[in-house]
Image (cartoon, helix red, strand yellow):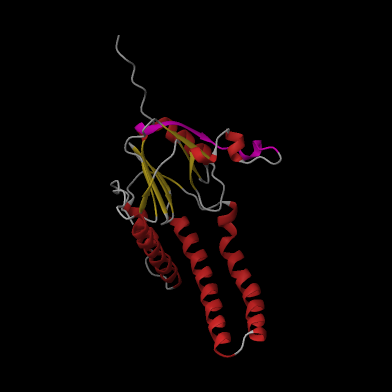
């Protein structure tokens, strides 16, 4: 994972970089869950410190994030028990043992994923400094935008959506023009970049990805975050006569 301070170079071998990033993400995931259960120092806390100082905007109270862990744990107690019973009836011998073990591992992985994701989202926030906006989605996604590269910022009003519409329709945007930095919860803030967006970059699992004209991101309090970013934007330069 990048420390969030410098722009990562584009990968030479994309597939190899993607695999390395996925392995790194798994390591972070298991370490976060283990440290949380053993009450040790959390990797997400140290990761958040490395992103720098600034005003924090949390993203932990979304509709999905609020119920993620209870929902996943409950589903494991119900669905896995039913699936284990079906395996015991249908499979025989070594095949039965292998399927039981695979299902148990899948169940454990799902719980670890939910616990680590919820923990990381509780400790890693968006940050606004004097010159830079940092958008962080747990360990998985990181975006750094110089304030000078931001053209506009506005909150997304999901209540304005009519039946059958989604927020793309409300904002009159096409999905191909938007980079979505959100997980499960719908984005609540929309940021427009200037042409070229000098100095702006985005990584997923440590691999640099191209940024589009618009960035959609989730924040618990989009309006205060919008106002803070708008206030921090540098004033446009007026050409001298």
Give the side of residue 84 with respect to residue 120, left or right.
right
Residue 125 in the image, given as x and y percentages of width and height: 43, 50
Residue 11 in the image, given as x and y percentages of width and height: 31, 52
Give the side of residue 2 with respect to residue 169, left or right.
left
- At 38% from the left and 69% from the top, the residue drawn is 40
- At 48% from the left and 61% from the top, the residue drawn is 117
Q: How many marks?
A: 0
Residue 239 in the image, given as x and y percentages of width and height: 32, 15
- At 63% from the left and 82% from the top, the residue drawn is 87
- At 52% from the left and 64% from the top, the residue drawn is 114
**Quadrant in which residue 235 is drawn:** top left
Residue furthest out toward the top: 241
Residue furthest out toward the bottom: 93
Of 183 and 232, the residue lying toward us: 183
**Quadrant in which residue 86 is drawn:** bottom right
Report the magenta residues as a range: 148-162
Viewport quadrant of the N terminus: bottom left
Q: Is residue 100 above or below residue 156?
A: below
Residue 166 counted in the magenta span? no
Q: Is residue 92 above or below residue 37?
A: below
Residue furthest out toward the right: 163
Residue 47 in the image, given as x and y percentages of width and height: 35, 57
């Amino acid at each position: 994972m990048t420390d969030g301070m410098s722009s990562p170079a584009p990968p030479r071998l994309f597939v190899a970089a993607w695999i390395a990033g996925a392995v790194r993400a798994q390591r972070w995931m298991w370490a976060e869950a283990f440290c949380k259960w053993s009450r040790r120092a959390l990797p997400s806390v140290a990761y958040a410190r490395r992103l720098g100082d600034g005003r924090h905007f949390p993203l932990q109270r979304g509709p999905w994030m609020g119920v993620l862990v209870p929902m996943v744990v409950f589903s494991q107690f119900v669905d896995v028990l039913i699936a284990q019973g079906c395996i015991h009836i249908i499979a025989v011998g070594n095949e039965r043992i292998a399927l039981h073990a695979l299902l148990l591992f899948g169940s454990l992985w799902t719980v670890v994923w939910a616990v680590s994701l919820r923990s990381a989202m509780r400790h890693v926030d968006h940050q606004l400094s004097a010159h830079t906006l940092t958008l962080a989605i747990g360990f998985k996604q990181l975006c750094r935008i110089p304030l000078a590269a931001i053209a506009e910022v506005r909150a997304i009003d999901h209540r304005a959506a009519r039946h059958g519409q989604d927020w793309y329709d409300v904002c009159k945007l096409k999905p191909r023009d938007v980079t979505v930095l959100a997980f499960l919860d719908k984005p609540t803030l929309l940021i427009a970049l200037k042409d070229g967006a000098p100095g702006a970059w985005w990584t997923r699992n440590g691999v640099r990805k191209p940024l589009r004209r618009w960035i959609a991101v989730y924040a618990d309090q989009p309006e205060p975050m919008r106002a803070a970013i708008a206030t921090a934007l540098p004033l446009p330069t007026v050409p001298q006569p």
